[in-house]
Image (cartoon, rainbow, N blue to C red):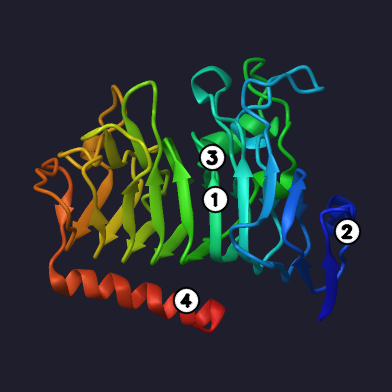
Amino acid sequence: MKNIHVTPDDDICDILANITQPTTIYLKKGVYRAKLTIACDDVKLIGEDRETTVITYDDYAKKPHFDGREYNTFRTFTLCVTGERVMISNLTITNSNIAPETHGQCVALSVNARLFHAKNVNLVSTQDTLFTAPFPDDLVIRYSGLTDDPTYYDGFIPRNQLYMEGESFHYFENCRISGTVDFIFGGARALFENCELISLDEKRGNGFIAAPSHSLKQKYGYLFLNCALKNGGAAANSVFLARPWRDFGRCDFINCSLEGHIATPLFDKWNDTYRDNTARFSYYNISGGDFNPVNWSHELSSEHANEIINDFTALKKNYFGE
């Protein structure tokens, strides 16, 4: 495997654009102001220090793009991963937009690949911090230009970001993820293990940690295992664990600790929808308050919780050898 050592004075965009083989990139601590894409397979991006190795940019959904349209959520990323088996560790990825109420969504990390691993990483933004592919099928149609409907988009998202055949597995290990609204969203089968999920102040009212869009065909969605859900400035009783971005979104919260910012019902159905009839939300052994979960969520038995944990552990070992 090729090794490259990079400092903030180097052109990291050019370096990533010219990688054609498995490569480990070591980032010297400092601030890298850059909008980056990792398109090559089997790349490792390793920072010198998690807190002081920072990749940052500030695109936002309502920003005018040179093609005449607004950026839209999915062009706002600071780092986009389309290569398979990419691993990032020991660094911070930030979208520095702090006004989603006027600027719209602002993605820090967009993972548009089947296999991905993040370890000891800080992901920092406000609304829509982390996107985990695949896209919902209806958005693939909308954004690909596969229709004559003039109200739809015309293929403004590159194909290697929009299309992803097959089921994904994303593994976030010992990460710290901050945001306000739907700050972990998408349709990946993803494990968040020993992570801190930090809810920031949301000036518009309620916050939402996860917004899953899984298909009914997917057995599993997001598993939050041994995570600490922390208050980074949110109002008391104002943040929901999840709301379904699409009808059959799935989230399981197992062995997680919650603080007083988490809303008593735990889950929300997403505005004026009937997704309380279809969403697959469950929990087991959560601590930190006296909660009254909505009646359409499900408290797992110990046997079912262990079955889920074992299945994800097998995936982790199969794909990442851990």
**Mark 2 secondary-structure assignment:** helix
Position of 24 relative to 269 (above/below): below
4 or 2: tag closer to the N-terminus: 2
Between 45 and 272, the one lying in front of the other is 45
Say which of marks 2 and 3 sits in front. 3
Left or right placement of residue 78 versus residue 266 in this view: right
User: In the picture shown, does residue 232 fall above or below 106?
Assistant: below
Could you tell me if residue 19 is visible in this image?
A: yes
User: Which is more foreground, mark 4 or mark 2?
Assistant: 2
Going by the numbered disc 4, the residue's amino acid type is: Lys
Closer to the eye: label 1 or 4: 1
Q: CA distance from mark 4 to mark 2?
A: 30 Å
Residue under numbered circle 4: 316
* Label 4 secondary element: helix
Circle number at residue 123: 1
In the image, is residue 209 above or below residue 284? above
Q: Spatial distance from mark 2 to mark 3, Cα to Cα?
A: 25 Å
The residue at the point 76 percent across, 44 percent down is: 33
Q: Residue at x 34, y 45 (%)?
A: 248
Q: Inspect the image, locate mark 3, and give the three-letter code of the amino acid beneath it.
A: Ser
Can you give x and y, in whole percent of width and height, for residue 311 in the image?
Answer: 35, 75
